[in-house]
Amino acid sequence: MIKKLTSSLPTFKTLEFKTGLNILLAERHETSGARDTRNGTGKTSFIELVHFILSERKNPKDDFHKPELVGSEFETTFHDDGSELVVKRKAGADKDELWRDGAEILPINLRADLAQSWFGLSSEILSEKYSPKFGALLAYFVRKERNGGFASAILNSSSQQGWDSQVCLSYLMGFDWRLPQKLQVKKDQKKDADTLASMIKSGYLTDGALDIKKMQARLDLLDTEVETKRVEVTSATVVDGYRGHELTANELSTKIRDLNEANLEDLDLCEGIDGALEEVEDANIADVRSLYEQVGIFFSDRVNKRFEQVESFHKQVSQNREAHLRKERRDAQERISRRRRDVDRLQRALAEKLALLRSGVAIERLTYLQSDLNQLEAEQADLQQQIPKFQNVAEDQKRLKREIDDLVDLIGQDVMERDAPRKSAVKIFADTSQFLYDEPGQLIIGKSTGVAGLSIETDIVGKKSGGKNHMQVFCFDWLLVEAALTQDRFPGFLIHDSHIFDGVDGRQIALALKLAQKKCDSLGVQYIVAVNSDDLQKIETELKAEGTDDFDPYEYVMPTRLTDEPDGGLFGVRF
């Protein structure tokens, strides 16, 4: 239990606790507004102070490292089985200092000692991955509202991982905590296997699964490609001025093409001239005279002389046209012959250039070939290294999935086989919730429907309302107290600040405190809870209305009271 909490800060309100129920009363100053009901008195700071004194690492952003508190010492006296433990911590600007019973100690060592004495955690367990840890277990008995500690009964904070909750609750409630621990280890291995598979190129996947045969086929093909490329690189000869020779060859090819196209034009011209020559030879004026005579037209001698003159003139024109056409034909044939000689000459020069180009490569081409070879060799080496690693990845994924499913089944089987802790937990939650709401709530424990592992669900009447949701946390925390006591894994105290009663009516608060008082007396534990003065007045009114006289909450109010006055609160200062 916590016996005393004090500080070197002169304005600090020393808190002294006793065994059983301790009500830390938070009173509003008469000038306070309605929104000050749960703020400014230091109730939350009290929770934060307990965590600060026992924390493993310095948090420079917390209240204790603000200028007003830096250099102040805070001291807590714990009482357990007749012996006392005094822990003092000093918030330093650069480094915090910690003492146990007057001797300086490292936070990690203090927490290791308390983990053993309060929760039965040996150093061997603490060193294991995904094992229950001191801070996570303590957070269930000293929930922090600012961390979302009252948002869920199952989680001690909104950032707690599912595996951590399963391990801690299994440990406190008497189930096999190593099963969710092993489950998380297997999940890590499965994640690694999945990540390994996803690193493989999509070309090596078939229907989303790794296809080793494709990898091996690619490697087999690469062996040939690499050897071929190596021969090509080693046998390549670099030709000096390769680019110049290549340009000359291109120019020669262009000239040859232009000459051939010009020859085709002249060949067409010659063909046209041949046709024209045939027309000249076929032209005969006698045919015209015969045509006229056939239709009965006869010419006089005078006309006949004129026709003879025309005929003579026509023959002369035909002869002239024939001579002109034959000259054009000879000119075209000469041009064709000349071009053909030029083409032959250019083709010989082109053949020499092409032969030279074929005999070697440009330096840029050799560099490109070498780059190709390097890429192929890198892919080859990568596959040679990957295939042995990935040979059984698909099998590992299947195996790990089976093992994960088996562990989830084992978790469910473990819960069913451990009748005593399971039935006890179900009964405690039902009895506690029934005391508050007249109907028993349900605690459902078993394996999850998926691969989450251990599933713990709470269900009480009207739990959707904010107040009843917090009462669900209240019921579950008292379940943990009794279960942890049975396992000898309880620190001796449970602490709630007034946020546990947010949205809760006076009757339920009265019943909760009355139940807590009974549990403290029967179990021999300490319960520290902060209550606002307004709530306490509501409690008193409800108790009087019910005619209850066996419980007076004022009997459990601590002598030190916190207020929201300017010099009030736990520290006596305003930040």
Image (cartoon, rainbow, N blue to C red):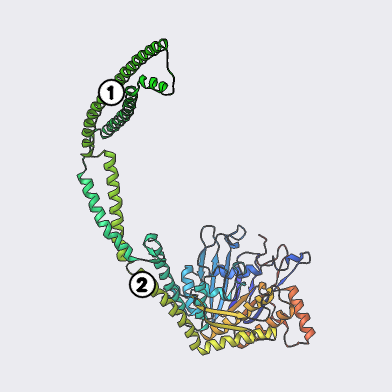
Query: Which of the pair 353/4 is nearer the observer?
Result: 353
Location of residue 8 with respect to 311 vertically, above or below:
below
Amino acid tagged 2: Glu
Instruction: Give the structural element (helix, strand or loop) at label 2.
Output: helix
Q: Residues within 10 Å of mark 1 (few under 14, many from 20)?
A: some
Amino acid tagged 1: Arg
Location of residue 377 with respect to 361 vertically, above or below:
below
Q: Can you give x and y, in whole percent of width and height, for residue 174 in the image?
A: 50, 84
Q: Name the N-terminal-most of marks 2 and 1.
A: 1
Q: Which is closer to the viewer, label 2 or label 1?
A: 1
Query: Which of the pair 297/477 is nearer the observer?
Result: 297
Instruction: Give the structural element (helix, strand or loop) at label 1.
Output: helix
Q: Is residue 517 left or right of residue 449?
A: right
The numbered mark at residue 395 is 2
Query: Which of the pair 264/177 is nearer the observer?
Result: 264
Q: Can you give x and y, in whole percent of width and height, for residue 272 in the image?
A: 34, 27
At horizontal 25% and vertical 28% (from top left) the residue drawn is 340
Q: Can you give x and y, in whole percent of width and height, for residue 79 in the image?
A: 56, 79
Which of the image's four quarters has the N terminus?
bottom right
Q: Can you give x and y, in whole percent of width and height, for residue 278 in the image?
A: 32, 25
Give the residue number, with chain letter if any, for mark 1. Answer: 335
The numbered mark at residue 533 is none
Q: Is residue 511 left or right of residue 188?
A: right
Q: Residues under labels 2 and 1: Cα distance?
A: 80 Å
Q: Are marks 2 and 1 in contact (CB under 8 Å)?
A: no
At horizontal 21% and vertical 33% (from top left) the residue drawn is 352
